[in-house]
Structure formats: structure tokens, C-alpha cells
Image (cartoon, rainbow, N blue to C red):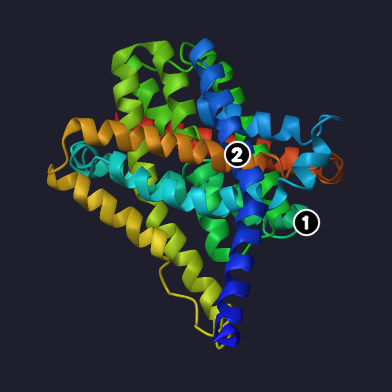
């Protein structure tokens, strides 16, 4: 009988070791998310997700913490960057008011789709011409065209991107999105944009949802409302884009099976969850309190995930492609801002 119990005991010990390995990193990710929330509360202009990435990069380079972050905490931080990101993206669907988006009209829908397509393919082409390594061109193109770091995390899940490529792309997109908070409000007057038009421009051109809110609120509640609706329309395009990337990866790896022996799913489970959450929101069945709690959970999960991704950034490595990455970031910024500005003028 003792022999029969040995395999089970070994399995229990293995699970226990795995759990003890990831807990330090998960605790660090939770602490980073809490610190980012505190920063956002003190300085509301700094979005919580932006603060999370910056904090993650900072602790990975502080002399007293970098050894812990790159050693003991690394398994849990990597897990947070993958698993918590997926759950947060599913909850992101609950914030997608499809009925509100459609009320903007088909001209605006077409404009946003055109902005996303031009930004994605233009950035992807330029990134490859500049010779950026790995999946960085794909990930940066996704971040600029859809919704910043969240979109990068979603696409990296289906493309199997290297963690360093993901972290470097998140850092660049977060930096440029943060700069937009200061730069775009200065351009409203010179470009002759009314408050609602400025809001649509911000929603169509700024990356992260928090950055959109921080930028658009400078022009008042009318601009903020337009910006959020247009931004939600861009977020709605996350699912088809991720599905297209998954299909492309599946085609390139046809016949290749995962470690479990199964072929990869044509549509990732978390993308299906995102669509299901959006459909549930559209039914109106969920009370406002439940949506508020879901939004809070989504922010917390994404903040912890982005802290984990930020902690994987290695600045000396990033610096080796820094010039090319900066050129790509500037080029993509010009594309998304220019195309979205033209689109706003055409649909005004």
C-alpha cells in the first residue's frame, strides 16, 4: 500500500514546490499594482497602468531589488505577465459598450477601422525595414493601433513572443502614450479642433484607455465622452486582430503540436472570453455595481501583469535597439495621429 501512495506524494510535493516558486513573484506583482494605484490616486494624470510598467522597469534595475526580481521572483512575475493579462483582457470585454459604440454611426466605425489598419500595417512594415529583432515590429504595431500594453499582451499570447520582446514593446508604447498626455492638448488650438472633435482624435490616436482619459479630460466632459466611445471602438477590434494573428501563426506552424500533444486552438480561449464578456455587457443583464467591480478587478489584474512585464525590461539590451525603436515609435506616432486627424475631419 505504501508503494501506491508514493506517486501521489511526489506529485503533491511537485505542486507544492511550484506554488512556493511563483508566490514571491505574484506577491511582488500585487505590491507593484498597489503602488501604481497609490501613485494614480496622488497624481490622477498618471494612469495606473502606465505607473505599473514604469515601476516594474524601475525595480528591475534598483541595486537592492534587481537580484530578487531576476531570481526568486522571476517565475511568479512571468506568470503574472501571462495569466493575469489573459484574465484582465477577458474582463476588458465587460467595459465594451457595443450599443454605445454603434450609436456613433457607421462613418465613425469606418474611420476607426481605417486608422487601425493604416497604423498596424504601416508600423509593421517600418519596424521590419528598420530591422527590429524578434516580434517587436508586430507587437509595437499592435500596441499603437489598438490599445497599448493590453493589446501587446494579447497578441504575444498567440504569437509565442519572447518575454524580452514583449517587455521592450510595452516600454516603448507606454512611453509614447504617456508623452501624448502632454503633447496632444497643446495641439488642439493650432489644429482648429472643437472639444468633441478633439475627443474623437484622442480616442482614435492614443494607445491605452487610461492615457485616453488623461488626455481628453483636458478639454472637458464632452471631449472625454467622445474619446472614450471612439477608444472602445478600437478595443472592439482587438478580438479580430488577435484571431487573425493566431490564424497566421497556426498556418506557419501547421502540423506542429503543443507540449500537451494538441494543436493550438484557432481562436485563443481568452479571446473567446473577451467576446463573451462583451456580449454579456450588451444584454444589459449585469447591474452597474457588478460592472464597477469588474472594472476594478480588470485594472488590478492588468496593473499586476504590466508590472511583471515591466520587470523583464533590461535597459542595456533595450539600448542596443533604442535608436531604431525610437524611430519606429516616432514614425508610428506620426501615422496614427495623422490618419486619425484626417479621419476626424472627414467625419465631422
Of tags 1 and 2, the one toward the viewer is 2
Question: Residue at coordinates 59% horizontally, 26% vertically from top-left?
Answer: 51
> Relative to residue 291, is residue 299 drawn left or right?
right
Q: Which residue is mark 2?
A: 27
The N terminus, quarter of image: bottom right
Name of the residue lying farthest toward the front: 1
Pick the front one: 340 or 160: 160
Work out whether 252 lies above or below 152.
Answer: below
Q: Does 30 sit left or right of 104 as displayed?
A: right
Q: Distance between the Cα atoms at labels 1 and 2?
A: 37 Å
Which residue is painted at 78% across and 40% down in the image?
68
Tell me the quarter of the picture where residue 254 sits: bottom right
The quadrant the C terminus occupies is top left
Image coordinates of residue 45 in percent, x first then y, are 51, 15
Q: Which is more toward the observer, 77 or 180?
A: 77
Secondary structure at numbered mark 1:
loop
Residue 130 at x, y percent in the picture: 76, 52
What residue is rendered at 74% in x and 37% in y?
326
Sequence-first disc among 1 and 2:
2
Question: Which residue in the protein does label 1 denote?
Answer: 131
Q: Residue 144's quadrant in the figure?
A: top right
Q: Nearer the viewer, residue 147 or 299?
A: 299
Amino acid at each position: 500500500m505504501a508503494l501506491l501512495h508514493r506517486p501521489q506524494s511526489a506529485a503533491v510535493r511537485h505542486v507544492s514546490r511550484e506554488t512556493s516558486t511563483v508566490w514571491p513573484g505574484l506577491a511582488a506583482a500585487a505590491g507593484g499594482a498597489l503602488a501604481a494605484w497609490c501613485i494614480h490616486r496622488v497624481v490622477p494624470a498618471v494612469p495606473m497602468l502606465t505607473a505599473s510598467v514604469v515601476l516594474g522597469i524601475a525595480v528591475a534595475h534598483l541595486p537592492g531589488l534587481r537580484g530578487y526580481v531576476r531570481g526568486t521572483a522571476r517565475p511568479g512575475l512571468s506568470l503574472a505577465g501571462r495569466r493575469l493579462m489573459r484574465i484582465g483582457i477577458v474582463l476588458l470585454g465587460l467595459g465594451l459598450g457595443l450599443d454605445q459604440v454603434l450609436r456613433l454611426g457607421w462613418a465613425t466605425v469606418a474611420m476607426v477601422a481605417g486608422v487601425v489598419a493604416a497604423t498596424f500595417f504601416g508600423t509593421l512594415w517600418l519596424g521590419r525595414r528598420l530591422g527590429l529583432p524578434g516580434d517587436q515590429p508586430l507587437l509595437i504595431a499592435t500596441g499603437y493601433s489598438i490599445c497599448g500594453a493590453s493589446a501587446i499582451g494579447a497578441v504575444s499570447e498567440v504569437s509565442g513572443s519572447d518575454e524580452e520582446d514583449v517587455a521592450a514593446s510595452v516600454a516603448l508604447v507606454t512611453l509614447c502614450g504617456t508623452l501624448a498626455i502632454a503633447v496632444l492638448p497643446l495641439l488642439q488650438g493650432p489644429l482648429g479642433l472643437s472639444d468633441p472633435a478633439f475627443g474623437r482624435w484622442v480616442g482614435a490616436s492614443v494607445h491605452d484607455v487610461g492615457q485616453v482619459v488623461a488626455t481628453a479630460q483636458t478639454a472637458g466632459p464632452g471631449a472625454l465622452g467622445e474619446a472614450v466611445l471612439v477608444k472602445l471602438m478600437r478595443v472592439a477590434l482587438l478580438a479580430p486582430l488577435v484571431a487573425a494573428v493566431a490564424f497566421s501563426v497556426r498556418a506557419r506552424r501547421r502540423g506542429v503540436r503543443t507540449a500537451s500533444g494538441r494543436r493550438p486552438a484557432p481562436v485563443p480561449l481568452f479571446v473567446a472570453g473577451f467576446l463573451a464578456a462583451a456580449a454579456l455587457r450588451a444584454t444589459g443583464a449585469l447591474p452597474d455595481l457588478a460592472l464597477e467591480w469588474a472594472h476594478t478587478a480588470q485594472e488590478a489584474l492588468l496593473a499586476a501583469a504590466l508590472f511583471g512585464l515591466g520587470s523583464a525590461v533590461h535597459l542595456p539590451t533595450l539600448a542596443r535597439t533604442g535608436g531604431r525603436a525610437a524611430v519606429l515609435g516616432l514614425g508610428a506616432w506620426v501615422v496614427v495621429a495623422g490618419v486619425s486627424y484626417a479621419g476626424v475631419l472627414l467625419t465631422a
